[in-house]
Amino acid sequence: MTSPPALAAAQLPREKVEHFDREVEVIVKRYPADRKAAALIPVLRAAQELFGPLNEDVQGLVASRLGVSRARVDEVATFYVMFHTKPVGRHVVEMCTNVSCCLTGAEKIWAHLQKKLGVKPGETTADGRFTLREVECLGSCGTAPAMLVDEEMHERLTVEKVDEILGRLS
Amino acid sequence: MTDRILTARWGKPDSASLASYRKDGGYRALDKALGMEPAAIVDEVKRSNLRGRGGAGFATGLKWSFLPKDVRPRYLAVNADESEPGTFKDRYIIEHDPHQLIEGIAITCWANDIHLAYVYIRGEFAKQARLLEQAIDEARAAGILGPRLLGKKDFALDVFVHRGAGAYICGEESALLESLEGKKGYPRLKPPFPAVVGLWGKPTIINNVETLANVPWIVEHGGEAFAALGTGKSGGLRLYCVSGHVNRPGVYEKPVHQNLKQLLYEDCGGIPGGRAVKAVIPGGSSAPVLAGHEIDVSLEFDALKAAGTMAGSGGIIVFDESACMVRALWRISKFYAEESCGQCTPCREGTPWLEGILEKLEEGHGTAADVAKLEQLAGNIMGQTICALGDAAAMPVQSFVKKFRDEFLRHAEERRCPFGAHAWGLDQTSREARVGDVVY
Ligand SMILES: Cc1cc2nc3c(=O)[nH]c(=O)nc-3n(C[C@H](O)[C@H](O)[C@H](O)COP(=O)(O)O)c2cc1C
Ligand code: SF4
Ligand code: FES
């Protein structure tokens, strides 16, 4: 079985855990005192931002702080596409290839991205710089094609614009 | 007559700030509402013929009246999931005029005796979540929200933003509640409906962002005035999101019964290259498609229903004559296969099957029997599932095949896509978008 919560936390850097605990304290205030579990998604997001992928240790920490089972944390961490349980690159590039984006040229840009980065959807470049993902409609269909880079939206994409955006990242 | 309710302030300097909202008369409607009996506000909303802008078009006032009289607490969940392909309006309400939404939330909570509201916003809208949180903080600091509504009424109201983490299904109201409770987004069996058994088992109102943003105007000008902007059982204006093959894509605020053809040719500047319209999806990718000759139609809920489709989320996707319908449907089916939560067998098994057949057809390996199989499979999903995602996956398939059968059969006969490398159309350029008065 997985490690007990105290041990899980012990394997993570102490200052980070303290920082995390302060964030958790703020987040749970948004929910009724007896409904702490509702904070699971925002707390997982905070954990991912602090610790990186939601591996066993991180999941254990989250479970212990919210008083929910490890199984439930895992279920939620794997259900939502914005959570990572495996390591990802320094930057996550998520391009929409849904209909409105394709009608305005997404397929060409998507092909360019794969070629430029030399990876298939879901993969990370060998230098660990980029993880490339194909995603569904981003709610930017009027200003399509669209992609997210590290959760920041970029719209009305062209091949040139994509090159410029990625070129700025190390 | 008013031709702008939601977009009136978009593009003004600092339109998202409390100061500018107040300068333009913001929170006056809340002030008026606090002087009214809560039940009278519900009546006013009923009279307005406001119908849900999230997808189902359910009468808002009626929904509110389903709350059981004597159960407390009650909650409000605002649906800002905006994940239906082709839909991109709620984000701009939040970006350009978040206080209009907050005022709508405050009035709704006062009218329904609700003291805690959550805005469930899709995870991908990081910027919008931040902007909305800022606006809520501003309203709280100004004493509008918090222990005393508008600083004058002994009525506490807390509003929080709850950011999702990427799952289309969480826009479905019961999955949204599950997600808000900190679970994976599995839709619940209905009944009971959320108005009776909702968040944490308590009565919960769920409304779309755009729906609630209309409430201040209704309170200020009266339900009848709102009803008069529309027709029949649908009142007001709504935000149409137009994307795909048009010269001016964007968000257009027009009467609920706006004519589709007029919208495309007058407001959106027609079709690139002067090409003909081949197909239009009028209400988000779940809505059955209209063929080019069917677009001289009112976009009103009941009118579109009569035309065999639905007004849905107001997401209008336009395909010109150079686009391939098989390719388009393949992509749509891939979306539903991707987003099925997997709870019901027909949806879990049927959606990838549809996707697979469409891939085969588009890649030139399909047969006429496959085309028939598509219809049969879609028929087996329709009405057989816990939530409406199953239907949403089936309806595009049924309508595309029915209306463009020749094109599907041609793919089988020629054993290739007749459109070749241009399956998404001859001209796939991104064009300037109009969002209210703002140009992107
Ligand atoms: C699969 C699915 C996805 C949905 N996605 C959304 C969404 O992103 N936003 C939304 O407001 N409603 C969405 N809905 C509709 C909601 O279930 C619900 O009807 C709506 O939020 C109610 O608010 P309204 O009455 O104000 O429209 C979706 C429904 C289904 C079945
Ligand atoms: S219809 Fe599909 S998405 Fe909806 S509950 Fe069933 S499996 Fe899940
Ligand atoms: S289809 Fe790409 S953002 Fe909507």
Image (spheres, coloured by chain):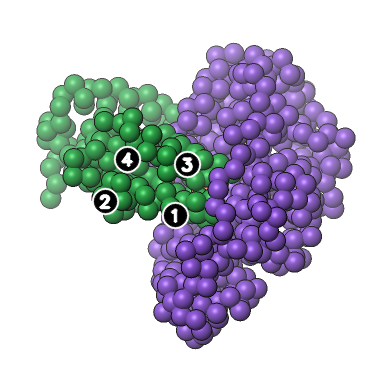
Chain colours: A green, B purple
- The mark closer to the camera, 4 or 3, is 3
Q: Is residue B184 visible?
A: no
Q: Can you name the residue that lies furthest to the bottom here?
A: B369
Q: Amino acid at mark 4?
A: Val
Disc 4 CB within 8 Å of nearest ligand 3 atom: no
Q: Is residue B262 visible?
A: yes
Query: Which residue was labeled with disc 2?
Result: A119
Q: Nearer the viewer, residue B213 or A126?
A: A126
| Lower position in the chain sequence, tag 3 or tag 2 | 2
Q: Gap in Å between the C-alphas at discs 2 and 4?
A: 13 Å
What residue is drawn where x is 64% and y is 44%? B249
Q: Position of residue B366 (x, y in %)?
A: 45, 80
Q: Nearer the viewer, residue B8 or A128?
A: A128
- The mark closer to the camera, 2 or 4, is 2
Q: Nearer the viewer, residue A100 or B167?
A: A100
Question: Judging from the image, what secondary structure is the residue with disc 4 in?
Answer: strand
**Apparent side of residue B282 relative to residue A35 in the rendered image (left or right):** right
Query: Which residue was labeled with disc 1?
Result: A107
Discs 3 and 1 carry the same chain letter: yes
